Image (cartoon, grey):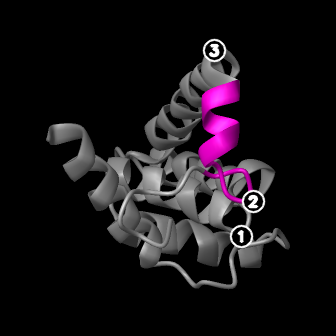
Amino acid sequence: SGILAGVRYLDQLRDQFESEIPVTDRTWFAVASYHAGASRVVRARERAVELGLDPDRWFGHVERAMLALAEETRSAGRKGMYRHTVTYVREVRTRFDTYVQATAPELALRAGPDGVTKTPGRGS
């Protein structure tokens, strides 16, 4: 099905990031990669280090670095996807949180110890 294919693709994107990064942050990196491309996420992680932020955490860290890159590209007269990607990831998170609240008993049964629901056929 299309949904299963999408979940598998998200898993592939998530697997591009180091396993030492918590799976929840790898998931947000994957969502950002889906929207903007992995190279932009890698650049934002590098910028996070330059700004003294944690390159392994999305919210409040790589997210902020991506916004800094958005400002830099805008100042240089170039258009980029950075700001749109931050908005996109926040919208996905909002929807995810809404779905979890609506279906919490079901998801709680399938979620791993880190709170992330596992994809069928991928270690669940």
Q: Residue at x 70, y 39 (%)?
A: 108
Local SS, label 1: loop
Q: Which mark is residue 22?
A: 1
Q: Of the residues under marks 1 and 3, which one precedes in the sequence?
A: 1
Q: Which residue is mark 3?
A: 102
Q: Residue at x 64, y 66 (%)?
A: 23
Q: Which mark is residue 91?
A: none
84 relative to 63 in the view: left or right: left
State how far apart marks 3 and 2 are (Cα). Answer: 19 Å
72 in relation to 71, above or below:
below
Local SS, label 3: helix
State how far apart marks 1 and 3 are (Cα). Answer: 25 Å
32 in relation to 13, above or below:
above
Image coordinates of residue 71 in percent, x first then y, are: 58, 46
Q: Residue at x 76, y 60 (%)?
A: 113
State how far apart marks 1 and 2 are (Cα). Answer: 8 Å
Image coordinates of residue 54 in percent, x first then y, are: 80, 71
51 relative to 104 in the view: left or right: right
Q: Which residue is mark 2?
A: 114
122 or 52: nearer the eye? 122
Residue extent of the magenta highlight: 105-116
Asked if the magenta segment contains residue 65, the reply would be no
Q: Seen from this angle, which residue lies furthest top? A: 102
122 relative to 113 in the view: left or right: left
Q: Are marks 1 and 2 in contact (CB under 8 Å)?
A: yes
For the question of whether residue 97 can be seen, the reply is: no
